[in-house]
Image (cartoon, rainbow, N blue to C red):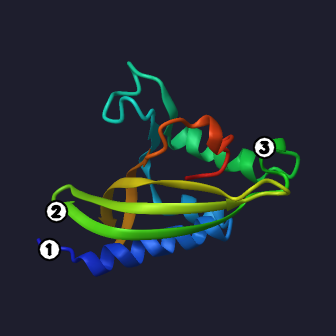
Amino acid sequence: MKEIGRAQVEDFLYHEAALLDAWRLDEWLELLTEEATYRVPSNDRPDSDPKSALFTIADDIRRIRARVTRLKDPHAHAESPRSRTRRLISNVRIVEQNPLLVEANFVIYRFRGNEDVRQYVGRYRFTLETRDGRFRIKSREAFLDAMELASLGTVSFIL
């Protein structure tokens, strides 16, 4: 099997970030596998299992699709008007080749209505698969560095 390079992974992560920032959520969904998971664990137990610990978000593909449907609904109070975000991805590393495990740092700036700018800082962990010559997301985890989440407000958008 040909080894995958960091530049390929970076390009994919930058593409994913651009789709989310542009609120192109249907195109973002196309990046996911049918087994995809999206998780945001609590700060105090970041490597725990969502079956036995409290998670901010612990979605399977069905819940991810439902989340996107809610976010796109013009009557969705949590995101109407929708947040404007800008994601900065850095320090991309391939941790393992098989399965393809990738980590990267992120900063997300969120602008919404008359609220102050909110900053979400942390680390992503992705498990990626290659299908038809393209990467697909099998799992996506966002580990927030904030010690307490209340000051960040509702995390209604996709981190």
- The amino acid type of the residue labelled 2 equals Gln
Question: Disc 2 designates what residue?
Answer: 97
- Which residue occupies the foreground of this view, 13 or 86? 86
- The amino acid type of the residue labelled 3 equals Ala
Q: Are marks 3 and 2 in contact (CB under 8 Å)?
A: no
Question: Could you tell me which secondary element the residue under label 1 belongs to?
Answer: loop
Relative height, residue 126 to residue 153 (above, below): below
- The amino acid type of the residue labelled 1 equals Glu
Question: Is residue 10 shown left or right of residue 1?
Answer: right
Q: Is residue 155 visible?
A: no
Question: Is residue 98 shown left or right of residue 87?
Answer: left
- Between disc 3 and disc 2, the foreground one is 3
Question: Disc 3 designates what residue?
Answer: 78
Relative height, residue 48 to residue 152 (above, below): above
Residue drawn at x 63%, y 35% is: 150
- Which residue occupies the foreground of this view, 21 or 30? 21
Q: Is residue 136 visible?
A: yes
Residue with the most extreme right position: 75
Question: Disc 1 designates what residue?
Answer: 3
> Could you tell me residue 136's position as x and y percent?
39, 62
Q: CA distance from mark 1 to mark 2?
A: 7 Å
Q: How many marks?
A: 3
Q: Are marks 1 and 2 in contact (CB under 8 Å)?
A: yes
* Residue 13 found in image quarter: bottom left
Relative height, residue 21 to residue 47 (above, below): below
